[in-house]
Amino acid sequence: MDVELLALAQRLRSESGGSAAYERLMATADREELAAALTEQECPLWARELAAFRLGCAGDRRAFEALVLLLNHRDPARCVSAAHALTRLNDPRTPRAAAALATNELRVSYALLPVRLLTRLRAPESVPTLMTVLRRRLVPGDPYWRVALACVEGLGALGDKRAADILRTARTHPRLTAAAEAALARLN
């Protein structure tokens, strides 16, 4: 079993109370049954998440909207699972959605996973979005240094020379210095 699916299965088994519905959604190979859970009224969140994850990992684009909503959820475990499934889904809308979530200043506290997803995707939107998010995080007193660090690491991993100036600026921030130095070294 996939490591991410195993982690998700354990977490959702607990949330569902080990219900028969959980066991059914976990065991089914029927994509129509999984897709029905995404639109069923009064369906619990754990069931929607399980269905979206399984469909996304199977490449079924009906999971896209549910996965994007989960990527922006307040529960980091849901965000991690959604990011994994979105990577496997390979939907061309994913980079644009991740960029929109990463740059939403009203939800910046939830931007960490969209930033990391953009790095994994290596899409045309990735570098400009990470530079924009990092620039916003470099203001004095910004509390979202983990998001800034993810941007620095992502820009280093992407290796795009357009990021050199913003990475040089990031070097002056104590929590970002080492990562910015490493990212700049990767650009050269």
Image (tube, grey):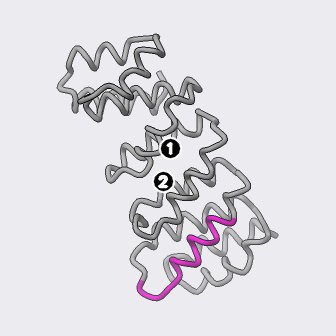
Picture residue at 53% right of the left edge, 83% below the top: 173
Magenta stretch holds residue 134:
yes
- The answer to whether 176 appears left or right of 163 in the picture is left
* Furthest residue in direction left, as rendered: 17
Magenta stretch holds residue 67:
no
Pointers 2 and 1 in contact (CB under 8 A)?
Answer: yes
* N-terminal label among 2 and 1: 1
- The answer to whether 11 appears left or right of 35 in the picture is left
| Residue under numbered circle 2 | 113
State the separation of the CA atoms marked 2 and 1. Answer: 7 Å
- Report the span colored magenta: 128-141
- In this view, 30 is above or below 104: above
Most frequent secondary structure within the magenta stretch? helix
Picture residue at 20% right of the left edge, 19% below the top: 19
Picture residue at 36% right of the left edge, 50% below the top: 73
Mark seen at residue 83: 1
Picture residue at 59% right of the left edge, 26% below the top: 59
Give how far across and how far down residue 135 sits, in percent.
59, 78
- In this view, 129 is above or below 46: below
Q: In which quadrant of the rendered view does residue 17 lie?
A: top left
Crowding near the residue tagged with mark 2, few <14, some 14–19, many ≥20 C-alpha atoms within 10 Å: many
